Amino acid sequence: MAAHTEAQIRRAIKPLLTVYGELNTSEVKNLLHTVLEFSEEDMLPSPTRNEPRIIQRIGNIASHQTETVKFYDEGFIVDKNHSPAKFALINPISQVVIQPAEVTTIKEKTRRFIARKVDWEKARDRNNEIGDQGEEFVLEFEIDRLIETLAIDRTNATQNVQHLSRLQGDGLGYDIASINDDGSPRYIEVKTTSGGFNQPFYMSKNERHFFEEYGDSAFIYRVYNFNRETRRGDVRIITQTELFSNFNFDTITWQVTPK
């Protein structure tokens, strides 16, 4: 895998900010590995600085910026009024920078989630080809949802829907990052089956903790009747409230079934 460009790094910073609100350059450098799998080329030493090349590229985003405050299409600002520079999330609908009170709330949720995070592999989903195919299907489904509900073009919709890698999904607690109708972050966990809606799906402690912390911003996209050949199926969007009210959790098998 080749080294990541600054453009790819900027795109990876957006989902990082959805679970932190704002971060300074040093914090982004420390956390980027949770949302981007570094390649061997990324980790080669910089010829000009005593750090890996990818860490230097993170710093370059701010250092190469000519404006004091710049809005990036990826969905955040970089504010050089601070030292180190501050990366802050933008609401893509209102174009308003996240406010300090909301940053505090988001960071507290993230702190609690990480503090009790359980290292439970998502092997049952991740090692299953249908799981990967279901996520790709939901990615397009969600882009279409934004186009229809928010009346935005495909370019903007695609910019606001991000499919996280296996490392990213496990690191942040969800599979796909999107936005709600008001522009606030939407966290999507995809559960896919070729069977009907009542077929059990698996949910780890880590995933359940994420839904407990992120409440109305977290959704299960239950993909059922999925056809591997056409790579299409039916989708039911399950809110956090519905998940905990209308489904049974088996703490031994980790199976979740409708009541």
Image: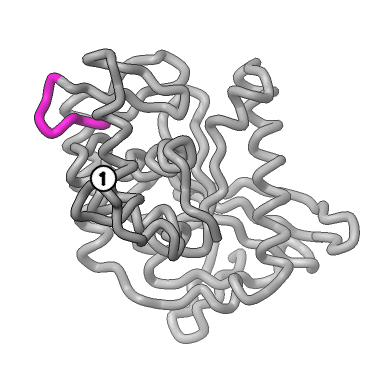
Residue ID at (38%, 61%): 171
Residue 232 within the segment the image draws in magenta: no
Residue ID at (42%, 42%): 9
How many labels sit on residues?
Answer: 1
Which residue is label 1 attached to?
28
Specify whether 106 is left or right of 125: left
Residue 43 lies, in percent from the top left, at 36, 61
Q: Is residue 61 above or below residue 110?
A: above
Q: Main secondary structure of the magenta part?
A: loop
Residue ID at (20%, 64%): 115
Q: Is residue 121 above or below residue 101?
A: below
Residue 248 lies, in percent from the top left, at 52, 69
Q: Secondary structure at mark 1?
A: helix
Q: Which residues are magenta?
A: 81-87
Residue 96 lies, in percent from the top left, at 33, 15
Asked if one can make out residue 244 in the rendered structure from this viewpoint, the answer is: no
Q: Amino acid at mark 1?
A: Val
